[in-house]
Amino acid sequence: MPLDPTLFVGYLVVAAIIVVSPGPDTMLILRYTLAGGRRVGFATLSGVQLGILGHITAAVLGLSVLILSVPIAFKAVAIAGAAYLAFIGVQALRAGTLRISPEAQAQALEVGRARAVRDAIITNLFNPKVIMLFVALMPNFVAPQRASVPLQLVLLGVTLIVINVAWQTGLVLAAARLRQWLTRLSVQRVIAIISGIVFIGFAVMLLIEHVVQSHDTVVVSP
C-alpha cells in the first residue's frame, strides 16, 4: 500500500471534519439545488470536484507550494476568490430584489447547470483554504519511504474527492427534497437574498483573514 495505514486513518478523520465544515462549496450546492433542483445540484457538486482535481494537479506540479510561499501571489488568489464570491452574492441579491413581473423574476432566479459547474470550479480553485489544505496539511500524512510523494498526494486528493462526493450528495438530495416545499416565488426570493448576503459575508471573511490580517511571509510545512 503506497500510503501509511496509520497516517491514512488520521487523514480520513481530518478530511471528514474539513468536508462537513460549512464553507463556500456547501453554500453554493445548497443555494443552486434549492434554485434549480437536483440536476443543478449535482452539476454544482461536479464543479467542486473538478476544482479539487485542479488543486491535486497544482500540488503534484509544485504550483501550490509556489503560490503559498510567495505572499503577493497568495494574496492575489485570495482577492480573486473573494471577488468571485462577492460577484455570486451580488447576483443572488439582485435576482431576489428585482421588481419585475413574476415570469421575469422566476427566470432571474433560475440557475442553469453550466453556470453551476462554472461557479463551483472557480469558487473552489480560488479558495485559499483549499490551497493551504494541499500544501500545509496533506504533507503531514505522507510517508516518503513508502512511495513517491506525488503519488501519495494524488491518492490523498482522490480520497478527499470520495469523501466530498459522499457528503455533498447527501446535501443535494436533502436540498432537492426540501425544494418541493420552497417553490413559491416569494420563498425563492428570500432564499436568494439570504444566500447573497452569506456569499458576500464569505468574501469579506476571506479578505480579512488572508489579505488584511495575513503576514508578509507564509510558512509552508515540509
Image (cartoon, rainbow, N blue to C red):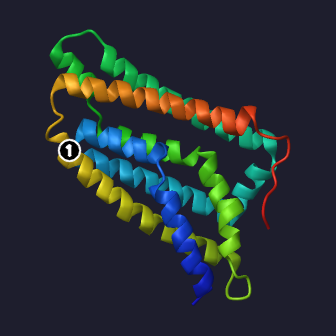
Residue 180, image quadrant:
top left
Residue 138: quarter of image: bottom right
Residue at the spot x=33%, y=21% of the render? 95
Give whichever of 47, 8 is nearer the camera.
8
Residue at image mark 1: 178
> Where does residue 163 sit, x and y in percent of width and height?
43, 66
Examine the image and state in which quarter residue 59 appears: bottom right
Task: Specify few, some or many for label 1: CA neighbours under 10 Å numbering under 14, 14-19, or 20 or more.
Answer: some
Q: Amino acid at mark 1?
A: Leu
Residue, far right = 216
Taking the image as shown, residue 107 lies to the left or right of residue 165, namely: left
Q: Residue at x 60, y 34 (%)?
A: 205
Is residue 201 depicted above or below 47 in this figure?
Answer: above
* Residue at horizontal 70 percent and vertical 60 percent from the top: 135
Q: Is residue 218 above or below residue 138?
A: above
Which image quarter is the N terminus in? bottom right
